Amino acid sequence: MKLSDHFKITKLSEIRHILGLVVTQNQFEKSIHISQMAYIHKILTFFGMEDATPVVMSLIVKYKLSAAQSLVIHDEKSKYQNYASNLYYLSIIGSLLFATQS
């Protein structure tokens, strides 16, 4: 049973982009490479982080975060709140989660 037995299928050309992903096909090696670089760049640009410097930040498995680790000095808190007020934390995390799940 083929999909074309049930639906009309039109082949336009090789796939290059789908849902923000870049698809590269190598017919000689019979391989497909899917890249999310365009999507990640779009996220960084949207949130004004295109000039951010990537860092490696390992987190120990089962590491417990607590309120005691939060900023306690009023000046530090206000500086951070001013900085974070322009960031859409949940949107950034949601975009990154989408990237890791696709």
Image (cartoon, rainbow, N blue to C red):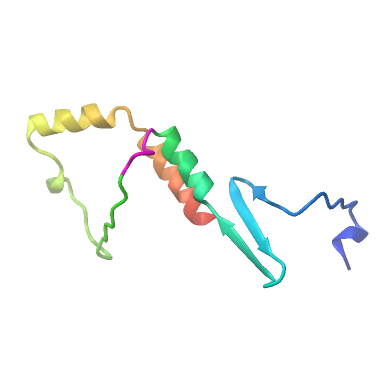
Residue 49 is inside the magenta segment: yes
> Quick one: which residue is furthest to the front in this view?
28
User: Which residue appears at 26% of the width and 57% of the height?
Assistant: 57
Q: In this view, does 58 lie above or below 97?
A: below
Compare residues 93 and 17 and report the one nearer the observer. Answer: 17
Say whether residue 53 is left or right of residue 5.
left
* Residue 16 at x, y percent in the picture: 67, 51
Say whether residue 36 is left or right of residue 69.
right
Residue 35 is inside the magenta segment: no
Compare residues 98 and 70 and report the one nearer the observer. Answer: 98
Q: Quadrant of residue 62?
A: bottom left
Quadrant of the frame with the C terminus: bottom right
Compare residues 13 and 58 and report the one nearer the observer. Answer: 13
* Residue 91 at x, y percent in the picture: 43, 37
> Which region of the structure is painted magenta?
48-52
Say whether residue 98 is left or right of residue 75.
right
Q: In which quarter of the image is residue 71?
A: top left
* Residue 21 at x, y percent in the picture: 59, 50
* Residue 76 at x, y percent in the picture: 11, 33
> Quick one: which residue is furthest to the bottom in this view?
29
Q: Is residue 101 above or below residue 83?
A: below
Q: Is residue 52 above or below residue 83?
A: below
User: Which residue appears at 21% of the width and 53% of the height?
Assistant: 65
Disc tally is 0
Q: Taken as a whole, is the magenta stretch helix, strand or loop?
A: loop
User: Which residue appears at 67% of the width and 73% of the height?
Assistant: 29
Quadrant of the frame with the N terminus: bottom right
